Amino acid sequence: MPDEPALSIPHALTQLARLLLEQDDAQAHTLVCAQGRFYRATVSLDPVAPQDVANVIQDYL
């Protein structure tokens, strides 16, 4: 049986954002376990005005 392809972080975040917006929510908080340690995890969706998209993209490059 072939291995499942690894889920990329941007793809996973996009899916999470869609789920949050479908539930009319803009934040998710949880406790996760990774590599034997526990972490608090928070995702917050902040709208970006269309005219600001190019500048925001540059912030992440």
Image (cartoon, rainbow, N blue to C red):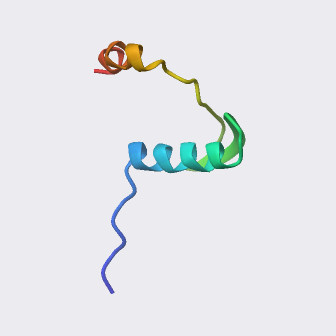
Q: Residue at x 35, y 14 (%)?
A: 59
Q: Residue at x 37, y 50 (%)?
A: 8
Residue 9, how many percent across, how many down? 41, 45
Question: Which quadrant of the rendered structure holds the C terminus?
Answer: top left
Q: Nearer the viewer, residue 38 or 51?
A: 51
Q: As drawn, is 12 to the left or to the right of 57?
A: right
Can see residue 37? Answer: no
Question: Which quadrant of the rendered structure holds the N terminus?
Answer: bottom left
Residue 31, how many percent across, how many down? 71, 43
- Residue 12 versus residue 4 in the image, above or below: above
Q: Quadrant of residue 25?
A: top right
Q: As drawn, is 50 to the left or to the right of 3?
A: right
Q: Nearer the viewer, residue 18 or 31?
A: 18
Residue 21, how many percent across, how many down? 63, 43
Residue 36, how many percent across, how many down? 60, 50
Q: Residue at x 61, y 50 (%)?
A: 19
The residue lying furthest to the bottom in this view is 1
Q: Quadrant of residue 24?
A: top right
